[in-house]
Image (cartoon, rainbow, N blue to C red):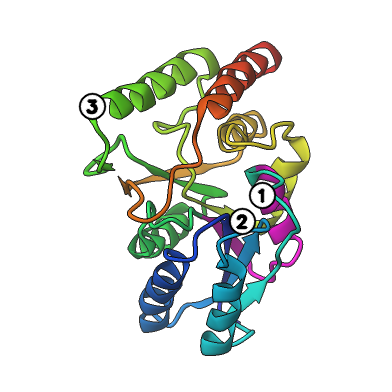
Amino acid sequence: MPLKYSILLPTYNEKENLPVIVYLIHKYLEISEIEYEIIIIDDGSPDGTLEVAKQLETIYGKDKILLRPRGKKLGLGTAYIHGMKHATGDFIIIMDADLSHHPKFILDFIRKQAEQDYDVVTGSRYIGNGGVSGWDFKRKLVSRGANFVSQILLRPKVSDLTGSFRLYKKPVLEKLIESCISKGYVFQMEMMVRARQLNYTIGEIPITFVDRVYGESKLGGSEIFQFVKSLLYLFATT
């Protein structure tokens, strides 16, 4: 039996981006004859994202597009937990639906995992030819600063702790989620810290992060405050 990959796409107001990212995932994985499913977890988007997702389900088929919506915005971490319950793949890939993560890198994740049977493969903006496109100097500085401070305090043994484009073995992700406390944007950061604690093997690949073309960033002042609060919590408990 060929290996299967479940791709989790949490969405909130992504009606413009969703058809593009689904098309690109389909394009790169179909041509490589990789077995996959895309699980769309929409959190009650008022812009019609779910209606667009239903059209994509009709186009690509219910075996490729699984709709698992929720009634309201409940947070990124819980979206992954919700999506994972419905995943049938051997591996789970988490990525953003706003085109900041290009689906072409999925093939690199798969190849890297196979090299040494890694438990986790994470994308990094800070190794090799990885990087960021579309950010001004201030935002790059904030991102670098957050990652730098996180590295000093948490020593995660990965170069990009705040990234959110990753591949997990399904049982590994289930175990990590059980051990995590955070439910918001810091959820991604805590996952790597817990993976280190549990001695899971972690591979890294360089990726390019591209700032969103359509819609608005979900990162605001409250998320930054939660990041600092959770960083201090993780430092105190790990």
Secondary structure, mark 2, is strand
Q: Is residue 177 left or right of residue 110?
A: right
Q: Quadrant of the N terminus?
A: bottom right
Label 1 sits on a secondary structure element that is helix
Q: Position of residue 19 (x, y in %)?
A: 44, 73
Q: For the image shown, how many numbered marks are present on the structure?
A: 3
**Quadrant of the image containing the C terminus:** top right
Write the residue at 38% across / 63% down: 103
Q: Is residue 238 visible?
A: yes
Circle 3/circle 2 CB separation < 8 Å: no
Label number found at residue 137: 3
N-terminal of the pair, mark 3 or mark 2, is: 3
> Where 221 falls versus 2 (above or below)?
above
Distance from the alpha carbon under mark 3 to that under mark 2: 36 Å
Q: Which residue is mark 1?
A: 173
Residue in the image at 38% along x and 65% along y:
107
Camera-near label (3 vs 1) is 3
Q: Name the spot of residue 131 as percent of width and height, x first.
A: 26, 40
Range of magenta residues: 77-94
The residue lying toward the viewer, choosing from 236 and 219, is: 219
